[in-house]
Amino acid sequence: MVLRWCLLPLLFLLAEAMASELIRAVRAQGLGAASLLHPFTLWFLAGLVFRIGFAKLLRRTGREDPLEFIDTLEHELTHAMMGYATFCPPVSLTASLKAGGEVELKGTNPLAALAPYFLPLWCLLVAGLGLAIRPGIQTGWNHLLFFLLGWFCYRLFREFHWRQTDLHIYGFTFSTLSVAILLLLSLGLLLQLRGLLSARWLEAAAVHAWHSLPRAWERIHSLSGLGNRGVT
């Protein structure tokens, strides 16, 4: 617990640096918020709006949303797959439409516990398959990827909240900053796999974070100095 609290300032600096450099790199590719009419941006918004609209429509008609099962399945599968990757394999996994899902791992670690909030599983699957499809349909494949990214954001917005037990295993603040860093890394990887982003943004983020350390230390030192002068 002490180590997690000590890491918080460093995680914050890293998250800020990664967000700044990823946004800068994405804007350089013409995918930023200033270009809302870009096809990829429109497909992302289409995925988000479709998922919101479909859920509201079914709620108004008093029916269960069958797509929630797909969301639940993705959530539990990411726990399980990251558990395998980090030597905490799953012992059992359940997923249902009405009762939700649950996965039991043989051990635990932050990556396995937080995987559903930073790992867009269906998007990674589509990005991986896209490496083997014909060049002529790569643009359409990118549209599908951004549509699924919008869908993932819908699931993330619904599941990331204070009452989510996954986020309290290692502390909510630690989990939030860790998810932010890993989510940015996942998004950068997806765009890189599709040839939409250079890996240089990650190097720039590391340099940005390194240069932020002295400024942050000076800020903390000045604040502590003001506090000490106020003590009599």
Image (spheres, grey):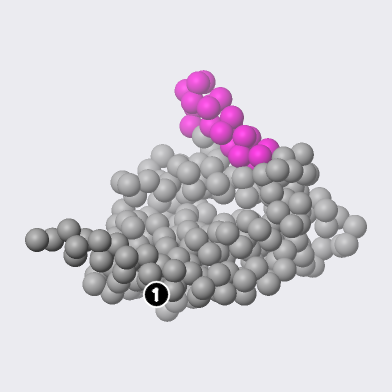
Q: Is residue 12 magenta?
A: no
Span colored in magenta = 44-64
Could you tell me what secondary structure mostly forms the magenta stretch?
helix
Which residue, as the protein is rendered here, is positioned at the far right? 136
On screen, residue 219 above or below 62: below
Indicate left or right for 110 with 19 as reference: left
Indicate left or right for 54 with 162 as reference: right
Which residue, as the protein is rendered here, is positioned at the far top? 61
**Three-letter residue code for mark 1:** Cys
Where residue 167 appears, x then y in whole percent? 35, 56
Residue 119 or residue 39, whichever sits in front: 39
Residue 71 or residue 146, whichever sits in front: 146
The C terminus - image quarter:
bottom left
Which residue, as the protein is rendered here, is positioned at the far left? 232
Task: Say which residue appears at 63% left-offset and 35% top-offset.
Answer: 50
Examine the rendering and report whether any part of residue 91 can be seen: no
Task: Say which residue appears at 75% left-offset and 61% top-offset.
Answer: 196
Examine the rendering and report whether any part of residue 146 can be seen: yes
Q: Which residue is mark 1?
A: 88
- Within-10-Å neighbours for mark 1: few <14, some 14–19, many 20+: some
Where residue 132 appears, x then y in whole percent? 79, 67
On screen, residue 221 above or below 156: below
Where residue 69 appears, x then y in whole percent? 50, 45
Give the SS element for disc 1: loop
Where residue 18 appears, x then y in whole percent? 55, 64
Q: Is residue 61 magenta?
A: yes
Task: Say which residue appears at 70% left-offset and 54% top-offset.
Answer: 27
Which residue, as the protein is rendered here, is positioned at the far bottom? 87
Task: Say which residue appears at 59% left-offset and 37% top-offset.
Answer: 51
